[in-house]
């Protein structure tokens, strides 16, 4: 009996030793990035000892890195109460997008715990707090990447570039940063050499290829740019991506066309010609003038983007767009105001309304700020963009008011009668590039205010008031709008 007991003890020790050996080998594979071999070796360790904690911990990490969240959760449950369990659960929550849950965990004040807390803060948009959490951590690859992303989100790409090391993900981000900093040639050279090494990482490959396409097309290198775009089309569903971004604008366009066709069908042909002194311009005339002003504003934006960033499409590029878009809105507003002054000066007094109405600009400005605040509360859940909250943007929008809230409603009311207000509201987001949903809501609200204010002077001043207030707010507040 004693001999059997002794053999059982020896066999147990041998099995435990085998599990330890497998686990040590698994760790070596994991540290070299051979995740498949590491996973198979750790599973062998669990065959020897099903509840062997080091192997369970490594398997959770391996499945998290591979994106197998269900398997990672199953091994995490088997791990039970373990010192590393909160850290692993934090990583799982981050991959699931549960940033508040990750932040609510009792994470230790270790480098990994602080890193996970910073990742959760990043996910919630608290970039300053996240950066403070990252400062002082050992400069591992994931820490350097996180710091660079945070600095980019804070509008400091030069500093972000200086934080990067030589890892594969860091090199891909370096290419993106070089492009955003207005060095597209350097970015293209780096990414061309990097792409063959990124084929095993589909997400990184797609991002690098998208940046390479933008770099070539932005420089005007249409041959290589279209070739890169063709490669991108093989790994990304570009039509679906376009529809995901443009569906609100396309829906507004469809509704506008349906209403125009219906309105035109109700117009009876005139048997006589009636001459009306100082008749309001027709919708077609205003549409052509707006499109011409839009083309001129786009030309200004393209020229500025190419001059400053070497990118023709800086207008639609993150970070660069934050600098170029406000200039575009200002130019568009100036050209539209110029059209009003050049071609429709006789109507100017009726468009602006009585001069004492300028005092209405202050309550209108407050209403605009409240609208932006409410929109900022809901848009993260709907995935909607917003306007660049820059003073030049609001100055440009103020200059557009005589055209969009002065001339347009009168022209459409005269031709389409009761359909006029609806068409006027829809035309604003159609002809003004930007967040369609927000612009449609603003258009409807401003038309309602215009009917009560009897002029556009107060509406234009309201945009100026809102822009000045936003210019005085600290950046963390603006990011919540």
Image: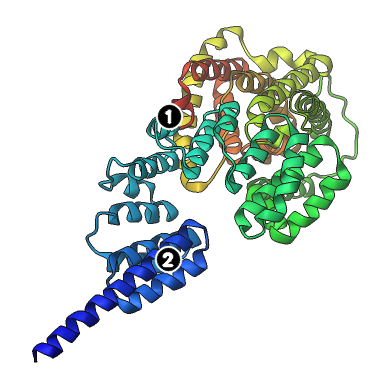
- The answer to which quarter of the image holds residue 222 is top right
Q: Which mark is residue 356?
A: none
Mark 1 or 2: in front is 2
297 horizontally vs 452: left or right: right
Coordinates of residue 460 in the picture (x, y in percent): 61, 18
Give neighbour class at mark 1: few <14, some 14-19, many 20+ (Cα, 10 Å). some
Whether residue 418 is visible to the viewer of this picture, yes or no, is: no
Spatial distance from mark 1 to mark 2, Cα to Cα?
A: 38 Å
Q: Residue at x 63, y 38 (%)?
A: 174
Coordinates of residue 477 in the picture (x, y in percent): 44, 26
Q: Residue at x 71, y 32 (%)?
A: 315
Coordinates of residue 82 in the picture (x, y in percent): 24, 58
Residue at image mark 2: 26
Residue at image mark 1: 128
Give neighbour class at mark 2: few <14, some 14-19, many 20+ (Cα, 10 Å). many
- Count numbered badges in the picture: 2
123 horizontally vs 345: left or right: left
Which element is circle 2 on? helix
Whether residue 33 is visible to the viewer of this picture, yes or no, is: yes
* Farthest front residue in view: 3
**Disc with the residue nearer the chain's start (1 vs 2):** 2
- State whether residue 20 is above or below residue 427: below
Q: Nearer the viewer, residue 125 or 361?
A: 125
Residues at discs 1 and 2 in contact (Cβ within 8 Å): no
* Farthest left residue in view: 1
- State whether residue 468 is above or below residue 39: above
Q: Which residue is drawn at 39% across and 39% down?
A: 118
Which element is circle 1 on? helix
């Amino acid at each position: 009996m004693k001999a059997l007991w002794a053999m059982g003890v020896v066999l147990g020790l041998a099995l435990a030793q085998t599990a330890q050996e497998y686990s040590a080998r698994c760790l070596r594979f994991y540290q070299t990035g051979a995740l498949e071999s590491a996973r198979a070796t750790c599973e062998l360790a669990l065959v020897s000892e099903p509840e062997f904690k080091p192997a369970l911990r490594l398997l959770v990490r391996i499945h998290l890195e591979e994106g197998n969240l269900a398997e990672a959760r199953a091994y995490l449950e088997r791990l039970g109460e373990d010192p590393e369990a909160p850290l692993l659960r934090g990583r799982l929550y981050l991959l699931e997008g549960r940033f508040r849950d990750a932040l609510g965990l009792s994470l230790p004040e270790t480098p990994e715990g602080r890193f996970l807390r910073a990742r959760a803060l990043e996910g919630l948009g608290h970039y300053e707090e996240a950066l403070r959490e990252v400062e002082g951590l050992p400069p591992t690859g994931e820490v350097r990447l996180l710091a660079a992303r945070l600095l980019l989100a804070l509008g400091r790409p030069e500093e972000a570039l200086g934080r990067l090391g030589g890892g594969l993900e860091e090199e891909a981000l370096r290419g993106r940063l070089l492009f955003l900093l207005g060095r597209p040639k350097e970015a293209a050279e780096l990414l061309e050499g990097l792409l063959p090494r990124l084929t095993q990482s589909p997400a990184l490959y797609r991002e690098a290829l998208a940046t390479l396409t933008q770099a070539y097309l932005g420089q005007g290198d249409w041959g290589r740019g279209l070739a890169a775009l063709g490669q991108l089309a093989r790994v990304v569903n570009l039509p679906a991506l376009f529809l995901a971004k443009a569906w609100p604008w396309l829906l507004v366009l469809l509704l506008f066309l349906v209403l125009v066709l219906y309105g035109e069908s109700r117009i009876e042909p005139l048997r006589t010609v009636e001459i009306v002194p100082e008749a309001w311009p027709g919708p077609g005339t205003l549409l052509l003038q707006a499109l011409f002003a839009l083309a001129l504003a786009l030309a200004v934006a393209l020229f500025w983007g190419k001059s400053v960033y070497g990118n023709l499409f800086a207008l639609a590029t993150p970070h660069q767009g934050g600098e170029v878009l406000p200039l575009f809105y200002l130019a568009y507003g100036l050209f539209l105001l110029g059209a009003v002054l050049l071609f429709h000066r006789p109507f100017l007094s009726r468009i602006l309304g009585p001069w004492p109405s300028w005092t209405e600009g202050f309550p209108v400005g407050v209403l605009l700020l409240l609208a932006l605040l409410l929109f900022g509360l809901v848009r993260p859940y709907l995935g909607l963009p917003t306007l660049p909250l820059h003073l030049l943007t609001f100055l440009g929008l103020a200059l557009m008011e005589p055209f969009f809230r002065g001339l347009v409603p009168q022209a459409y009311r005269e031709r389409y009668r009761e359909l006029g207000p609806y068409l006027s509201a829809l035309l604003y987001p159609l002809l003004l590039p930007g967040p369609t949903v927000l612009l449609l809501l603003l258009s409807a609200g401003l038309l309602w205010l215009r009917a009560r204010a009897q002029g556009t002077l107060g509406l234009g001043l309201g945009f100026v008031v809102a822009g000045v207030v936003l210019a005085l707010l600290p950046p963390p507040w603006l990011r919540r709008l």
